[in-house]
Image (cartoon, helix red, strand yellow):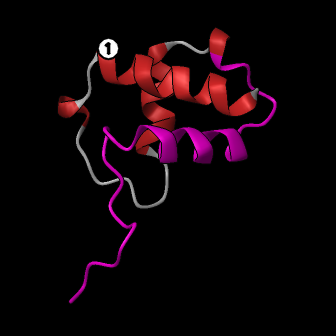
Amino acid sequence: MTDTPGSGLKWTDTLEIAIQLAERHPEVDPNRLNFVDLMRWVMALPGFMEDERHCGEKKLEAIQLAWIEERE
């Protein structure tokens, strides 16, 4: 088997993405981040496997909200 548990992040892995973004960008206020940059940052995360075509505003909003909650 080549897959390991926890590998291959997808757009729906909202909480894990938010945790990783908070760790990588502690100086950033997610309330002020535009969705274009958010999408780029998510896609740059290690192990992120999905294409930007599978991303949408609702998924980015969910990630942003989870990141805001993670900071609190």
Is 71 on the left or on the right of 55, as rendered?
right
Magenta residues, start to end: 1-30
Q: Give the answer, above or below, for where 3 lies relative to 14.
A: below
Count the labels in the image. 1
> Identity of the amino acid at label 1?
Glu
Of the 4 image quadrants, the one containing the N terminus is bottom left
Residue depicted at x 45% and y 33%: 40
Residue depicted at x 64% and y 20%: 30
Residue at which label 1 appears: 57
Residue depicted at x 45% and y 16%: 35
Is 21 on the left or on the right of 56, as rendered?
right
- The extreme right residue here reads 27
Question: Which x, y percent locates residue 72?
Answer: 76, 26
Q: Secondary structure at mark 1?
A: helix
- The extreme bottom residue here reads 1
Is residue 11 on the magenta stretch?
Answer: yes
Question: Which x, y percent locates residue 64?
Answer: 52, 22
Residue depicted at x 42% and y 28%: 39
